Image: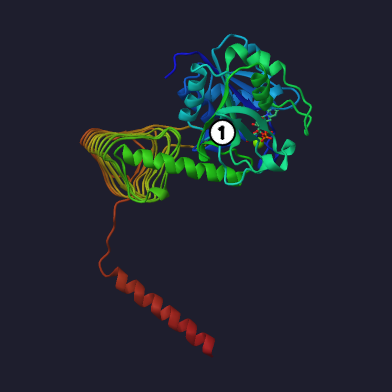
């Protein structure tokens, strides 16, 4: 990787009307992360040491979001949208700090990969003044065409300004380019707006640099990596491409996905080797899974940490703060939230564990509920090591069950239970010999009398 300093200027002032959204376009998410944050990540992976975001529409919302995903990025407001060349100059203050490379990128191109950016930067290291990232879309309509001559790029012509001959060119401007920092402001300041749209086109710097006798080249990126998002159908397309890439990466790193096309990752999912993920599993943000775990079908997992050799699902729901230690088991139709399930503990069937600790090797019977909420506050349930909670018990928090404690099925536990104690929290059973038969006879004769009366 080049040691040169690099500023990434990301254009994101557009409104994105076609998203039909109150939220700025570039904040719509892919894999749970705003698309512009994907762009920042790619820039950083390509060696950008500074990030300048040009915002406009929804500036306040944008600033708030940027604070979260790129706290070190600077934001610059472009008051009027006068074109991409004008937009880059909104970040004049950052550009004038003297970076060696300036990477101009679009906030709505979330699949751009670091390699394509690094390849363009490499051209600057080899003394080009401008390196434009080109691509070959299935249909070039709407894109600026790259006009090359003898290995050099001589112009980028916008669709509206193209001759019929130029419209036939399939090699198009992906929108991103690397510009040598020492030339950037001078070239940008020379851009005018005499064109079909009356806009200041960033792309004009190609001809301007050429006229100064500087070297200008084009590099090529894949169509996918240059995919620009304008509406929600394209957003879903980009999501699908992102998921496909991530699934492959997971499999190549040693994770088994039985039906990869049905498993959904978040931008930050961490998953260790020899973990097996069955079909139809959803990973929300903040999931970390160590090695050798089994995630059974139809599980929904977010904000959870899962240690080695855990067994989860089928149909498990792990919510934020679920912390499963080695060999813990959370089975079908169980929900765990903000709770630690310690080593070898089992929560196997139809249970809710929230705001709790389940001690090592404890066994939680089917249908157990931690009653953690009184409508106003949350309370903690502590279950000791090796405890046994009988099926269909309600543990009314705050409450604790000592080590080795034993809870009778169907109990409502409102008082803490000491170590090794047995607690019954239910009415004692009463059995009356012969009473069942007597009741049945009484009911049958009452029904017969009623039928007879109706017939008369
Ligand atoms: C641009 C390129 C075109 C390229 C295409 C690839 C120019 C002149 N044209 O055209 O060659 O093939 O992208 O998708 O650069 N923006 C601002 N402020 C502005 C104008 C634009 O921030 O004043 C932002 C937009 O929000 C967007 C990006 O810049 O993220 C590109 O602008 P857009 O209007 O989509 O340019 P295109 O016409 O698509
Ligand atoms: Mg566009």
Residue 20 visible in this rendered orientation of the protein: no
Q: Where is residue 199, by image quadrant? A: top right
Q: Residues within 10 Å of mark 1 (few under 14, many from 20)?
A: many
Determine the residue positioned at 38% across, 42% down.
248
Expressed as whole percent of the image width and height from the top left, the position of residue 302 reads: 43, 38
Q: Check the picture and name the quadrant holding the N terminus.
A: top left
Along the horizontal axis of the image, is 421 left or right of 125? left
The one of 363 and 337 positioned closer to us in this rendering: 337
Q: Quadrant of ligand 1?
A: top right
Expressed as whole percent of the image width and height from the top left, the position of residue 444 reads: 39, 79
- Which residue in the structure is indicated by mark 1? 134
Residue at disc 1, secondary structure: strand
Determine the residue positioned at 73% across, 39% down.
163
Determine the residue positioned at 66% across, 16% down.
212
Expressed as whole percent of the image width and height from the top left, the position of residue 72 reads: 53, 17
Along the horizontal axis of the image, is 263 left or right of 238? left
The one of 262 and 412 positioned closer to us in this rendering: 262
| 250 is higher (above) or lower (below) than 106 | below
Q: Check the picture and name the quadrant holding the C terminus.
A: bottom right
| 193 is higher (above) or lower (below) than 440 | above
Residue reaching furthest to the top? 97
| 185 is higher (above) or lower (below) than 217 | above
Along the horizontal axis of the image, is 444 left or right of 362? right
Residue reaching furthest to the bottom? 456
């Amino acid at each position: 990787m080049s040691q040169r300093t690099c500023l990434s200027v990301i254009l994101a002032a557009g409104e994105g009307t076609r998203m039909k959204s109150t939220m700025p376009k570039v904040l719509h998410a892919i894999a749970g992360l705003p698309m512009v944050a994907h762009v920042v990540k790619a820039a950083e992976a390509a060696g950008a040491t500074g990030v300048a975001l040009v915002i406009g529409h929804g500036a306040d919302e944008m600033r708030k979001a940027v604070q979260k995903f790129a706290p070190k990025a600077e934001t610059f407001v472009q008051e009027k949208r006068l074109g991409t060349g004008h937009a880059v100059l909104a970040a004049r203050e950052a550009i004038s700090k003297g970076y060696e490379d300036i990477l101009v990128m679009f906030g709505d191109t979330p699949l751009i990969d670091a390699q394509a950016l690094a390849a363009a930067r490499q051209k600057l290291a080899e003394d080009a003044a401008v390196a434009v990232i080109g691509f070959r879309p299935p249909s070039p309509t709407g894109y600026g065409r790259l006009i090359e001559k003898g290995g050099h790029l001589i112009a980028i012509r916008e669709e509206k300004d193209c001759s019929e001959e130029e419209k036939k060119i399939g090699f198009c401007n992906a929108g991103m380019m690397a510009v040598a920092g020492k030339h950037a402001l001078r070239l940008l300041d020379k851009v005018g707006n005499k064109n079909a749209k009356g806009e200041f086109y960033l792309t004009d710097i190609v001809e301007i640099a050429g006229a100064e006798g500087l070297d200008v080249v084009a590099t090529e990126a894949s169509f996918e990596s240059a995919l620009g998002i304008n509406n929600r159908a394209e957003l879903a397309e980009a999501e699908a491409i992102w998921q496909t890439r991530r699934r492959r990466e997971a499999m190549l790193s040693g994770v088994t996905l039985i039906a990869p096309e049905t498993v959904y990752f978040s931008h930050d999912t961490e998953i260790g080797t020899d973990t097996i993920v069955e079909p139809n599993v959803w990973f929300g943000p903040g999931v970390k899974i160590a090695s050798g775990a089994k995630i059974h079908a139809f599980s929904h997992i977010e904000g959870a940490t899962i240690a080695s050799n855990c067994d989860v699902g089928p149909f498990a729901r792990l919510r934020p703060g679920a912390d499963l230690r080695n060999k813990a088991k959370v089975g079908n139709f169980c929900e765990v939230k903000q709770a630690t399930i310690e080593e070898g503990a089992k929560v196997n069937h139809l249970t809710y564990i929230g705001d709790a600790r389940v001690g090592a090797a404890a066994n939680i019977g089917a249908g157990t509920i931690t009653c953690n909420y009184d409508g106003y506050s949350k309370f903690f349930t502590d279950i000791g090591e090796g405890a046994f909670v009988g099926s269909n018990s309600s543990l009314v928090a705050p409450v604790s069950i000592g080590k080795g404690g034993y809870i009778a099925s169907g109990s409502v536990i409102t008082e803490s239970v000491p170590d090794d104690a047995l607690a019954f929290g239910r009415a004692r059973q009463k059995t009356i010999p012969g009473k069942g038969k007597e009741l049945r006879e009484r009911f049958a004769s009452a029904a017969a009398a009623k039928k007879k009366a109706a017939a008369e």
